[in-house]
Image (spheres, rainbow, N blue to C red):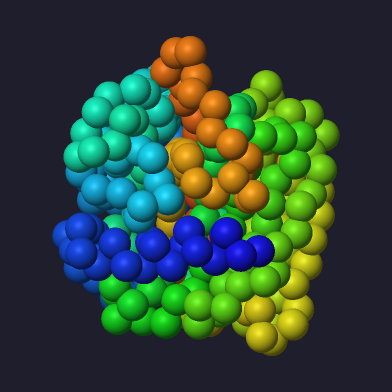
């Protein structure tokens, strides 16, 4: 999709300029972990703060829009003029990069035209690597669906919309993808919903994990026309996990327990 491609081109342009601290993490792929957000460990997570991912984004990343309490990560969006933007929003990213394995999250998203709640992996030129990416993107204009995608060396065009059993802003959903050399399998609430096997659509470089909430005034074809919420809104995550290929599964409902 044209507008999706534009948005992540902006990520490439701005992460290098504004988030060099996050990009300087070790190049050695990280190991298996389960994050249940009893705290926000700075050894694992970097909080995006003080920049945007491009002109399309109407909010500035703000550490004040990232909070952890009682096992829930909250990524907020609120009205606050900062650096010529009218709004602030929240994002975290791992310091480490992760290779083939099972990537999982439990999320409740934001509803509203113009919003995007995301769980994805990414690496790119800011990290002196080709642009590879694997996405779950919940578009607030229709929380009955989620958009899946993958990029290889900056080439996308692998979008797929998948129906959800319940609206993502009303119920938590367990989402996961299993990334292997010859395929990517996407799961929603333990059910396989999509598989990519085309070699041209399979990333090969270890990537960082991102959780984010943002909105746009301009990407209307993709996200819909932005509708300003009447009050601050937030996406919620209660678990994020990565299980390296060949390693034991780490919790009972993990896709890694039955991926083989």
Name the residue at 50% across, 30% down. Answer: 235
Q: Is residue 46 above or below residue 67?
A: below
Please say if 109 is above or below 7: above
- Which quadrant of the structure image shows residue 142? top right
Q: Quadrant of the C terminus?
A: bottom right
- Say if residue 107 shows up in the picture: no
Q: Position of residue 17 (x, y in %)?
A: 20, 64
Residue 209, x across and y down, in percent: 43, 57
Residue shown at the point (35%, 55%) measured from the top left: 54
Q: Quadrant of the N terminus?
A: bottom right
Asked if residue 107 is positioned above or below residue 227 in the image, the reply reads below
Q: Position of residue 19 (x, y in %)?
A: 22, 58
Q: Is residue 152 visible?
A: yes
Q: Position of residue 222 (x, y in %)?
A: 63, 50
Left or right: where 98 falls relative to 68: right
Q: Residue drawn at (81%, 54%), measured in percent from left and top? A: 193
Which residue of the protein is positioned furthest toward the bottom in this rendering? Answer: 199
Residue name at image x 63 percent, y 40 percent: 224
> Residue lying furthest top in this view?
230
Count of number-bearing discs: 0
Left or right? Give the position of 194 relative to 147: right
Q: Is residue 228 left or right of residue 150?
A: left
Q: Which quarter of the picture shows residue 199?
A: bottom right
Front residue (pair 60, 168): 60
**Within the image, what quadrant is residue 62 found in?**
top left
**Of all residues shown, which one is farthest toward the left?**
21
- 250 w.r.t. 68: above or below: below
């Amino acid at each position: 999709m044209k507008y999706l491609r534009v948005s992540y081109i902006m990520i490439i342009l701005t992460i290098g300029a504004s988030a060099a601290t996050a990009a300087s993490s070790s190049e050695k792929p990280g190991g298996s972990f389960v994050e249940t957000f009893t705290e926000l460990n700075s050894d694992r997570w970097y909080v995006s703060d003080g920049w945007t991912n491009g002109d399309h984004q109407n909010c500035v990343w703000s550490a004040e829009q990232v909070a952890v309490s009682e096992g829930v990560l909250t990524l907020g969006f609120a009205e606050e003029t900062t650096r010529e933007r009218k709004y602030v929003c929240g994002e975290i990213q791992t310091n480490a990069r992760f290779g083939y394995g099972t990537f999982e999250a439990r999320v409740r998203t934001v509803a509203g035209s113009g919003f995007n709640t995301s769980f994805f992996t990414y690496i790119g030129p800011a990290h002196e690597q080709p642009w590879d990416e694997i996405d779950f993107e919940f578009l607030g204009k229709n929380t009955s669906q989620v958009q899946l995608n993958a990029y290889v060396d900056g080439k996308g065009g692998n979008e797929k919309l998948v129906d959800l059993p319940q609206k993502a802003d009303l119920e938590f959903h367990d989402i996961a993808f299993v990334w292997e050399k010859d395929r990517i399998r996407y799961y929603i609430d333990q059910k396989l919903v999509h598989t990519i096997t085309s070699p041209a659509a399979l990333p090969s470089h270890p990537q960082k994990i991102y959780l984010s909430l943002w909105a746009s005034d301009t990407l209307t074809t993709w996200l819909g026309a932005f509708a300003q919420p009447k009050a601050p809104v937030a996406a919620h995550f209660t678990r994020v996990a990565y299980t390296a290929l060949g390693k034991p599964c780490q919790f009972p409902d993990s896709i890694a327990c039955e991926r083989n």
